[in-house]
Image: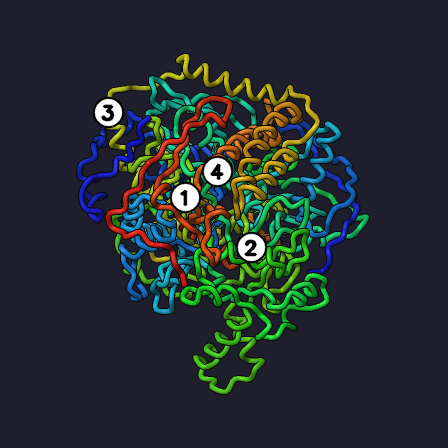
Amino acid sequence: MKLDSKIPAGPLKDKWTNHKNHLKLVAPNNRPKIDIIVVGTGLAGASAAASLGEMGYNVKAFCFQDSPRRAHSIAAQGGINAAKNYQNDGDSVYRLFYDTIKGGDYRAREANVHRLAEVSGNIIDQCVAQGVPFAREYGGMLDNRSFGGTQVQRTFYAAGQTGQQLLLGAYSALSRQIGLGRVQMYNRHEMLELVKVDGKARGIIARNLITGEIERHSAHAVVIASGGYGNVYFLSTNAMGSNVTAGWKIHKQGALFANPCYVQIHPTCIPVHGTNQSKLTLMSESLRNSGRIWVPKKKEDAEAIRAGKLKPTQIAEEDRDYYLERRYPAFGNLVPRDVASRAAKERCDAGYGIEANDTNEGVYLDFSTEIQTKGRQTAYAKGNHNPTAEEITALGKQWLEEKYGNLFTMYQKITDENPYETPMKIYPAVHYTMGGVWVDYNLQSTIPGCFVAGEANFSDHGANRLGASALMQGLADGYFVLPYTISNYLADEIRTGKISTESPEFVEAESRVKDSISKFLNNNGTKSVDYFHKKLGNIMWNKVGMGRNEKGLTEAVAEIAQLKEDFYKDVYVPGSADELNPELEKALRVADFIELGQLMAMDALQRKESCGGHFREEYQDAEGETLRDDENFKFVGAWEYKGDDISKEELHKEELKYEEIKIAARNYK
Amino acid sequence: MSAAKNININLKIWRQKNANSKGSMETYKLDNVSTASSFLEMLDQLNEQLINEKKEPVAFDHDCREGICGMCSLYINGRAHGPDTGITTCQLHMRMFKDGDTIYIEPWRSKAFPVIKDLVVDRSAFDRIQQAGGFVSVNTSGNTIDANSIPVPKVDADKAFEAAACIGCGACVATCKNGSAMLFVGAKVSQYALLPQGKVEATQRVLNMVRQMDEEGFGNCTNTGACEIECPKGISLENIARMNREYLKASLK
Ligand SMILES: Cc1cc2nc3c(=O)[nH]c(=O)nc-3n(C[C@H](O)[C@H](O)[C@H](O)COP(=O)(O)OP(=O)(O)OC[C@H]3O[C@@H](n4cnc5c(N)ncnc54)[C@H](O)[C@@H]3O)c2cc1C
Ligand code: SF4
Ligand code: FES
């Protein structure tokens, strides 16, 4: 198989414009003759379904939740980037492009990232027009803040609920199309198989999660917008239902899976509290604008804190190690996520962790300095030039509450501690997956007619993702890229006519699904699905987590292969096929997680360099920073499925070419 | 953190095979529940126990487990989202309960939210209300005007945001003795009514959404205010008043 990224010729800044000018179109009167399936209604899927419906295509959209409004995108807190330069701090399309490529450790595609930066401004315009209530300044203009890995303020936000507001915006656009009858919505439906006819994607098999009915749906093109696969680790910041099934099923049908080992570990999550924990909660990165990260300088202090004998507020300023400010003076607490995460791990591994859990993993995120600074500023702004200490503290806390109130409440509900009074405890957790289905510049996978958007594809982030760029990518794909590129593909489909669901291909795909369901239900094993999922998570976190090495990865490959065997032998799935059966849903998802987990370990094993979220312990410099190998690894690693035995998958390389940007070591000092 | 400890609890849970069958309260005993666990993690633990005993686990809705998707529901000890205010069920933690407590868990009870199974109900009526008009009719073409050319006073933007924060969980309906959806619909109508972008269609919007709300079988609002108390996002009754004003204005046109 030869990978053709279809990157248009010409200067980088004109590629997208030129490409759009030459893409084929479908005339408005022909669009109603064409059916499109969209799997997933997060930011990517909802915006795609709404846009394609608006254009006049027949759209069928699917999600496993009870409403499209609940897709995992809803949980994004911090914000969305756009190169608007409203703050006049020197931002531009080029800078957003540059920061993103550098942030991704030079493992993203230039052309895709440039297009993303180009349309970013448009996304904000679109969302505001839809009534998304972004934060405003007193003059009525949009407010911005900054995120890790950048030195400008380009992040638009709606308190700590930006994803929610953006998704509700996309959901409202989608609802409008549903109301108009242009989009048919299938809630509580899960896609379990892709149907190919003559090599092209022609439909899906879905399970109605309420009745258990297996349904056939045909279309001229299929869009997969099913989100990320962070739940391979069991514990992650992802919603419980997030899974890889749609992406993995198309992989098995011939779509290559790219860079599976690139996982983003987010530095500011609430540490693990116990063995019954089901997920981890993120504290938005925007908090790093106001919080300072530290651990005690003395090991005795860390020990005393863990033993509950000392409070963080009792540690004097000079006994605190603000390790990010120490190591990275230029960016300080705002270094990119992978850098901040590794630095926290380094301190905890060295024995300075402050959390009293099994692993002592936790560091402080402290707001006391900010309370003083902002309290004083606010007092001055109110004309009070001699504020008392109490006044300053009160005003500072009030300022924090206005900016981050919901996050602070969330933290308090979970931990029972008051972050206005004592520093938050945080530790890195699995958050976002940069890898995903390989797509070309048109967002088409290696299966003709099968497009992949949002977190489910691999294309825009490289080995690391900067904050506030995933929301941007999801909406860019759905609102502004797919409508053009899908039409180009569909222009050749206007004569195809309705696609029958009675063909042997549909029959065969349906029976594959029914077989795997009945296998699980008749398995009569002894252990729950979660039992295996947690085992997988343990292997992944310990051996394919924040630090990876050859030995661990080799072990992981073997252990996961063994786990797969045990899973099929001994899993017990209660209930029946023709009813709402959450355990069955989980079993089908975990089956795919296990196979993908193995591929992730294989991918990490072959990538003998450190870059972004992929830290191979063998490849680091004297200061413990990542050591990339551009000579040998400047490629996208795309895997081809070769049957049940995952270890047989074949690696294809898409060489990355940097025309505009000079590759350099990533330095945030 | 107050140190976590383990407690033993008794559970009375509504079990119902499907929409057409009759349900009943069943009793379960669950030991060694960490007070640091969330309420849903406690249910996971129960389900693990049931699966090990080869019994059917309890079906309940959940996804984000951080209080934002609106998927979790549950009527706990007679209160929507349980014995704490301003939170969803997934944010409720077991430290709110004591060793030996008996906890009653039921699904949302409302005519417009039929039970699907056990604790899972069908809230798609909310979607249909939104489809009737909960949007601004703008093309998704990307050819809109620059975002800053629509200035919005901060006070209005903040108010619109507060209304828009509704997560569509349905606690307001479940807790209302009339099963009214006014808080949910009021929040949506208010969000757009407060923003310049939404004004153009304000009349049609409120008429359509209210018509759909009535068709879905939600009850009438009699101003008891229970919805506001149980709403996890603090959506204020002010939004119902604003919707009523908008509705009146629209009806007089
Ligand atoms: C806690 C948190 C905070 C975040 N904060 C930020 C932030 O501040 N800024 C930022 O840019 N990014 C943030 N992110 C990342 C960002 O939210 C996600 O990457 C992005 O929302 C993914 O969108 P999506 O549309 O690709 O997928 P999702 O929103 O995950 O949607 C997936 C959809 O696919 C459906 N689906 C999946 N599988 C199937 C199937 N088999 N059949 C049918 N339907 C299926 C689901 O029902 C859902 O509708 C955050 C992520 C998390 C977890
Ligand atoms: S108004 Fe409050 S209680 Fe009602 S659906 Fe919205 S968030 Fe839930
Ligand atoms: S599970 Fe999402 S709000 Fe509770």
Given this view, does label 1 or label 2 mark the residue nearer the observer?
2
Residue carrying label 2: A345
Q: Amino acid at mark 2?
A: Lys
Which mark is first along the chain, 1 or 4? 1
Chain identifier of the residue bearing label 2 in the image: A
Badge 3: chain ID:
A
Badges 1 and 2, same chain:
yes
Q: Earlier in the sequence, mark 4 or mark 2?
A: 2
Lower sequence index among marks 4 and 3: 3
Residue A117 is left or right of residue A669, and the answer is: left
Sequence-earlier tag: 1 or 2: 1
Amino acid at circle 3? Asp
Q: Earlier in the sequence, mark 2 or mark 3?
A: 2
Are dots 1 and 3 in contact, CB under 8 Å? no
- Find numbered disc 1 in the image and state the secondary structure of the residue it sits on: helix
Check the picture and name the quadrant holding the N terminus of chain A: top left
Can the viewer see residue B229? no
Q: Quadrant of the C terminus of chain A?
A: bottom left
Residue holding disc 4: A605
Residue found farthest to the right: B100
Is disc 4 placed on a helix, strand or loop? helix
On screen, residue A108 above or below B161? above
- Marks 4 and 1 belong to one chain: yes
The response on whether ligand 1 sits within 8 Å of label 1 is yes
